[in-house]
Image: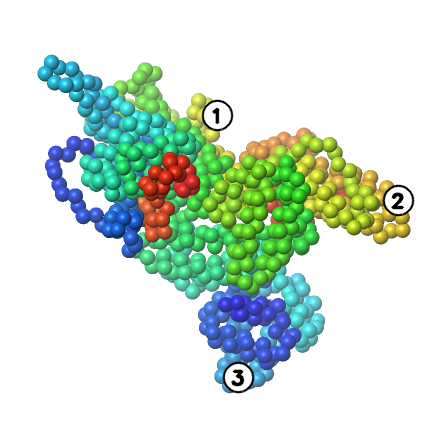
């Protein structure tokens, strides 16, 4: 999930030297029922963890938004050897890691899939213990599961949660299903374009229809790189600080053209403008501002097997949905993910989709304002429902059945 | 609730007019008293929306208004003993006026040539063709609440009409149960401080009921269109095409079981008939087929019976088997005591070899086997068979080829790609057609394909469409 659009979330600073008491937790969405737990009086709210490629969102179930939104980065200080001290290892997460150029950076999630479990665990533990200030043994954890996540990854997740974090209970919920839930629905066709990957997933009555899932490894990160190459006119590796600048420009100035060909045909000078960078430098930008997000509609051939754009991916998803269920999907096309926040995206997307599906399709495109957080919000709602409390996978069940319990209970 | 359903069904179908009127009137009045006017009215709205799905909301509303009004008046304390008879006569007279505000039906004018009780019975028997393509579009939650806050009663009536018109083939108790739950959800969620959470919670709770209602509507609609025997054949064909590697003895009991369930439950006034019977049917599906086909095995991992049923119902056809061609049944097969068995065997063997949607295969097989069966009544069935079999074989083959042509490229492409391929084929076939003519033909063919080329295409609509396309072949 990429953070885009006019508002930029303040990433959490991991170093907080001011001790403060843990606030008494009360959830405005919480139903008046006992939440998770069969251990007498130990009844603690769940924590929802949505691990995207670029951002980790974490907070208590029942809240309307995550408490912490952190860059998904772990920074590792190379070991320093001195004659006086033992070898020393320092690790930072999020913005703190990003701000230190001397660190070796690790990205635990690639294209939506966790690839570095140590780094992922480190982030989770740090936020749970140091920021949310809770004992991980007391709170059930709801994790989100991307499409095409290997079963082995889910099992590994269960292991980490129970063995390393000592969680009393967990649940692994589909990201797409949670996005549908965030809209108060159980049916929908989720169009999720985040930081590392874009998906279209049909969801019917709270279940993914797996044959309908379309995926493209082109999303926010790729767009930023494209913008950098265009503006800086360089094919060489771009420096980290320049990438930050490009990310900011993308979020603040890029837009989706309603008519790309028409916009492209206008004179270059009409688009030229000078932007002042934080360091005082001036930079000239032009048509890149709309060419950048255009890639989501017309990706280059290198970005996937058939190089479909998002509207075409939706069409392909629909073609695999049983005829009788298509209306439920067409009436609930849900835009999600940070890369759907570009100005003009919603209008262009709907126009393209209607052109592809034809006038007989009754297409309703829903684009909620907080759609970059829809997965987390759906998880927050789900984990706060009375009816959900019996669905947690308990530690006792894990110890009895092993990690594949998650495949049977979380479907 | 059961008794009310029975009585209102009787009222709707005119039975009340056939039996002792005083007795029936008393029962209706008692139920009006039990239900209360509002629920009685809602139930009437559902009944007449189901009965006349092609009507406008205003037309059905007017009819309901009249029925509720006459019931209220005639059930009131001290009402004239002839009130019921008088008011129903007035209603039928009003229905015969050219500007009657009630649902329109082509049979009305003939009913109006009759008089008295005969006219009332004739009117009561009128109904519209059911909707085979539900067109109900649920508004977004925001739209729902906006409409509800503006006019709660109007919203409820509009919903009952739209939903019952579109899903009218579902068993009545299910339809009543679901619509009641839905309106309850709207009432509580639109006044909730957190509507999104409320809607999700309610929808998750209603999930099984919704699925049961919509799936029942589908299968009962097909059952109503086909009748019992053709319904059985239809299910046999579908199963053979989904699991061509299974044996007849694996799939035939399933087809028969489902047909029996539908014959019992589609018109049942019991609230839980479908809810009891379908889960048992899914057990049989899993018992017979999960070892025959990995896709069915996956279906049987679903956590709920309704999930298993839906998974198997929506499963696409498999690649047909490459097997030696089969021969039509002989007079010995069809004229003896094992005729049904022979027809089942032939249906099964043809289906597992043939890639053409079920609505095509059901149609041509019914015609073929019926024609051959008629030979059994002739003096010399053997010579009749030797004359008719080649004709039927030729007709069958060309019908299937035409069906395959009509549906070519549809299931393996997106709709856009399908239309491109279709346009190319039509351009090749008719090089002199103008671009406008070509565009019209593409639109016509693709509309047909989207409605009639899938495994669960609606039989009533598609049968008439296929007739129109196949007229030459059927007459040859």
Q: Residue at x 16, y 15 (%)?
A: A81
Mark 2 touching mark 1, by CB under 8 A? no
Mark 1 touching mark 3, by CB under 8 A? no
- Give the crowd class for mark 3: few <14, some 14-19, many >=20 residues within 10 Å: few
Q: Residue at x 65, y 50 (%)?
A: B256
Q: Position of residue A152 (x, y in %)?
A: 40, 30
Closer mark to the observer between disc 2 and disc 3: 2
Disc 2 sits on a residue from what chain?
B
Q: CA distance from mark 2 to mark 3?
A: 72 Å
Q: Position of residue A399 (x, y in %)?
A: 34, 38
Q: Position of residue B328 (x, y in %)?
A: 78, 40
Q: Secondary structure at mark 1?
A: loop
Q: Secondary structure at mark 2?
A: helix
In the picture provided, is A171 more to the left or to the right than B99?
left
Q: Secondary structure at mark 3?
A: loop
Q: CA distance from mark 1 to mark 3?
A: 77 Å
Name the mark on residue A305. Answer: 1
- Give the crowd class for mark 1: few <14, some 14-19, many >=20 residues within 10 Å: few
Q: Quadrant of residue B123?
A: bottom right
What residue sits right under mark 2 in the picture? B383
Closer mark to the observer between disc 2 and disc 1: 2
What residue sits right under mark 3 in the picture? B79
- Are the residues flagged by discs 1 and 3 from a single subunit? no
Disc 3 sits on a residue from what chain?
B
């Amino acid at each position: 999930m990429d953070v885009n659009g006019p508002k930029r979330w303040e990433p959490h600073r991991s170093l907080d030297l001011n001790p403060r008491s843990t606030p008494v937790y009360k959830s405005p969405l919480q139903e008046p029922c006992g939440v998770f737990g069969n251990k007498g009086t130990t009844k603690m709210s769940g924590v929802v963890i949505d691990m995207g490629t670029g951002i980790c969102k974490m907070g208590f179930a029942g809240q309307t938004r995550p408490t912490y939104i952190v860059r998904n980065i772990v920074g590792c200080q190379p070991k320093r050897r001195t004659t006086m001290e033992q070898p020393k290892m320092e690790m930072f997460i999020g913005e703190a890691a990003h701000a230190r150029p001397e660190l070796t950076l690790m990205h635990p999630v690639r294209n939506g899939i966790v690839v570095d479990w140590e780094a992922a665990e480190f982030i989770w533990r740090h936020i749970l213990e140091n920021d949310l200030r809770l004992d991980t043994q007391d709170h059930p954890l709801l994790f989100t599961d991307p499409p095409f996540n290997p079963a082995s990854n889910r099992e590994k997740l269960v292991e980490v949660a129970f063995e390393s974090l000592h969680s009393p209970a967990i649940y692994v919920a589909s990201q797409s299903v949670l996005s549908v839930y965030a809209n108060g629905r159980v049916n929908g066709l989720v169009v999720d374009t985040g930081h590392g990957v874009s998906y279209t997933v049909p969801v019917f009555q709270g279940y993914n229809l797996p044959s309908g899932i379309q995926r493209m490894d082109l999303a926010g990160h790729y767009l930023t790189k494209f913008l950098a190459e265009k503006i800086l006119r360089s094919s060489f590796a771009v420096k980290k600080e320049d990438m930050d600048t490009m990310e900011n420009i993308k979020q603040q100035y890029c837009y989706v053209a309603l008519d790309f060909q028409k916009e492209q045909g206008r004179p270059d000078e009409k688009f030229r403008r000078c932007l002042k960078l934080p360091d005082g430098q001036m930079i000239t930008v032009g048509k890149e501002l709309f060419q950048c997000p255009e890639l989501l509609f017309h990706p280059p051939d290198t970005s996937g097997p058939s190089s479909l754009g998002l509207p075409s991916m939706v069409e392909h998803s629909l073609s695999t949905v049983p005829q009788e269920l298509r209306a439920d999907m067409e009436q609930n096309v849900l835009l999600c993910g940070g890369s759907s926040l570009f100005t003009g995206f919603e209008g262009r997307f709907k126009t393209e989709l209607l052109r592809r599906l034809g006038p007989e399709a009754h297409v309703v495109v829903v684009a909620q304002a907080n759609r970059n957080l829809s997965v987390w919000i759906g998880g927050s709602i789900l984990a706060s429902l009375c009816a959900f409390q019996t669905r947690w996978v308990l530690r006792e069940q894990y110890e009895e059945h092993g990690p594949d319990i998650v495949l049977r209970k979380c479907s | 609730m059961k008794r009310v359903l029975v009585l209102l069904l009787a009222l709707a179908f005119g039975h009340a007019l056939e039996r002792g009127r005083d007795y029936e009137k008393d029962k209706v009045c008692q139920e009006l008293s039990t239900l209360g006017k509002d629920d009685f009215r809602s139930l009437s709205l559902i009944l007449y929306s189901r009965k006349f799905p092609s009507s406008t909301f205003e037309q059905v509303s007017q009819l309901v208004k009249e029925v509720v009004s006459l019931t209220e008046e005639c059930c009131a304390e001290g009402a004239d003993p002839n009130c019921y008879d008088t008011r129903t006569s007035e209603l039928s007279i009003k229905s015969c006026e050219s500007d009657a505000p009630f649902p329109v039906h082509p049979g009305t004018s003939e009913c109006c040539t009759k008089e008295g009780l005969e006219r009332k019975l004739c009117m009561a028997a009128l109904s519209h063709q059911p909707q085979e393509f539900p067109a109900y579009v649920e508004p977004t939650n925001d739209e729902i609440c906006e409409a509800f806050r503006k006019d709660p009663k109007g919203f409820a009536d509009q919903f009952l009409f739209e939903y019952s018109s579109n899903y009218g083939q579902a068993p009545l108790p299910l339809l009543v149960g679901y619509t009641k739950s839905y309106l309850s959800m709207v009432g509580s969620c639109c006044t909730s401080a957190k509507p999104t959470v409320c809607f999700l919670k309610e929808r998750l709770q209603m999930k099984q009921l919704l699925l049961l209602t919509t799936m029942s509507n589908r299968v009962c609609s097909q059952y109503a269109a086909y009748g019992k025997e053709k319904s059985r054949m239809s299910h046999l064909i579908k199963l053979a095409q989904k699991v061509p590697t299974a044996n007849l003895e694996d799939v035939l009991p399933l087809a028969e079981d489902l047909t029996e369930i539908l014959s019992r439950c589609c018109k049942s006034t019991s609230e839980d008939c479908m809810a009891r019977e379908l889960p048992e049917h899914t057990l049989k599906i899993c018992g017979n087929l999960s070892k025959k086909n990995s896709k069915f095995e996956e279906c049987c991992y679903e956590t709920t019976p309704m999930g298993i049923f839906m998974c198997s119902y929506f499963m696409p056809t498999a690649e047909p088997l490459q097997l030696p061609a089969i021969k039509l049944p002989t007079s010995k097969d069809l004229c003896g005591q094992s005729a049904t068995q022979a027809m089942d065997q032939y249906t099964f063997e043809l289906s597992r070899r043939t890639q053409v949607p079920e609505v095509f295969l059901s149609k041509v097989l019914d015609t073929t086997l019926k024609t051959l069966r008629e030979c059994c009544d002739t003096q010399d069935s053997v010579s009749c068979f030797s004359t008719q079999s080649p004709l039927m074989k030729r007709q069958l083959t060309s019908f299937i080829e035409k069906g395959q042509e009509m549906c070519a490229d549809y299931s393996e492409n997106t709709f856009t790609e399908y239309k491109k391929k279709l346009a190319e084929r039509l351009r090749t076939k008719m090089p002199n057609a103008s671009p406008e003519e070509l565009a019209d033909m593409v639109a016509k063919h693709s509309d047909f394909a989207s409605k009639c080329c899938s495994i669960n295409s609606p039989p009533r609509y598609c049968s008439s469409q296929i007739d129109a396309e196949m007229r030459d072949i059927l007459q040859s």
